[in-house]
Image (cartoon, rainbow, N blue to C red):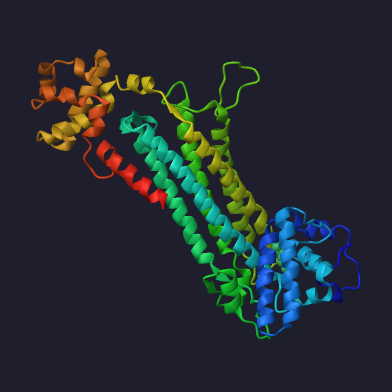
Amino acid sequence: MAKKMWGGRFKKAMDKNVLAFTSSIDIDKELAVYDCEGSIAHARMLGKTKIINSKEAGAIVKGLKAILSSLEKGTFKVDKNFEDIHSNIQFALEKKIGKAANKLHTARSRNDQVVNDTKMYCKDKIGGLIKAIATLQGSVLNAAKKYFGFVIPGYTHLEHAQAILLSHTFLAYVEMLERDKSRLNDAKERMDSLVLGSGALGGTTLPIDRLYVKKLLGFKRISRNSMDAISDRDFIVEFLAALSLVSMHLSRIAEDLILYGTKEFGFVEIDEKFCTGSSLMPQKKNPDVLELIRGRTSQVYSNLFSVLGMLKGLPLSYNRDMQLDKEPLFNSIAIVCEELGLLSGIFKSIKINREKAASIFKDESIFATDIAEYLVKKGIPFRLAHSITGKLVVYCEKNKKNISDIDIKTLKDFSGVFKKDIFANLNAASSVRLKRSLGSTNPTFVQREIKKWSKALKR
Ligand code: ARG
């Protein structure tokens, strides 16, 4: 049985089921590196303020560095007899350097230690996630460049709506992902305050130097209220909420690609490296990776709800319930990281299929909005133009005709302002080219956006 950090008050041994029930080491071992780094800064501060002597501080730092390097090499043995990674490292240090290790926990509680470790971990992970999102944006942008000029039907209500450049759709994904990066950055900024030095909840009587620790660990601020610092898990909720939005975006992108890749839509082809087959139907090439990206979003949402639920109604300050924040946190980060990498690979190898889109545009009713706006440009009020075009579409449907099959005389029965120039509007390329509003799918604007994004993502 491993030593406890709180043995003194207890006469009886722990019930045999308690360690397994209360232990978090299987999960929080992921914090090991941050725990060592936090402890190194704490020990340096204890030495600097002469709370412990410099020899002891030096020995602690040296011992922790040795543990760090064994963690990096993968030779550190996590000992499941300890209830958490903090105790495990404390006792590993004692084994390495002897009695001096007992001074490390001076002016510190696991309550501030665990928040500190988790914040350091989150800041690090957010940095990595932002990079991974930028990489995905880069792959999407490259696909937008590569297939610039290719027009697909855009959908509302999953019905043919208007002609849209595929690149415009891809740049929509880049925009969504940009908001994700900014949300993660915001969360990182808000969590960037040092909590070490808050003690168990009320601070310490010892003359610690929190500003020094803040500097050593690279935090922007120090927390101003020890009770809040100990009990605050908002940063985890915010991080999980930001990840939920990333995941929701990835699921929507995945769904577009699933649809666009079907025989029915047929605009894109997902490389078979990212597909699986059927054990029974020999012809199948299924988009399972995309389906799982779509599906796992619900797991990322549950992780957010799990932490929100755990925190609801908890009294200040630390409660053991809070230990349950880490599994959902780590799980969401792992899922999103994996998905970002896979989706980036999918965009790198995506191919387009021109025929299917071209065949959809043979039905010219998709240009109805352009026709209504043509009429507006000839002086017809929009509501009337809408109704004229509506009638024209119904006429075509009834007579199984396309608009360009109708002679100009018949068109003039719908509106006297129709001239032959209407026929030049009835194709996908003109439809996108005629768009004039900023932010629209006009190829000149889309090209400009591609340039802007190329520059921005290089930074
Ligand atoms: N494993 C604990 C957690 O993650 C560490 C803090 C324990 N503190 C305590 N007072 N029991 O929350």
* Residue, far right: 12
As displayed, is residue 435 above or below residue 69? above
Residue 132 appears left or right of 18: left
Residue at x 91%, y 73% (from the top left corner): 11
Residue 267 appears left or right of 19: left
Residue 201: tell me if it is visible.
no
Residue 169 appears left or right of 215: left
**Which residue is nearer to you in this view: 107 or 306?**
107
Residue at x 58%, y 74% (from the top left corner): 214
Q: Quadrant of residue 44?
A: bottom right
Number of numbered callouts drawn: 0
Query: Residue 291: horizontal and vertical position, in percent?
Result: 55, 33
Query: Residue 302: horizontal and vertical position, in percent?
Result: 60, 48
Residue at x 50%, y 44% (from the top left corner): 248
Residue 88 appears left or right of 257: right
**Which residue is nearer to you in this view: 444 or 413?**
444
- Figure quadrant, ligand 1: bottom right
Q: Quadrant of residue 267?
A: top left
Residue 76: tell me if it is visible.
yes
Residue at x 52%, y 71% (from the top left corner): 220
Query: Residue 258: horizontal and vertical position, in percent?
Result: 49, 30
**Which residue is nearer to you in this view: 25 or 101?**
101
Query: Residue 129: horizontal and vertical position, in percent?
Result: 53, 51
Can you say which quadrant of the picture contains the N terminus?
bottom right
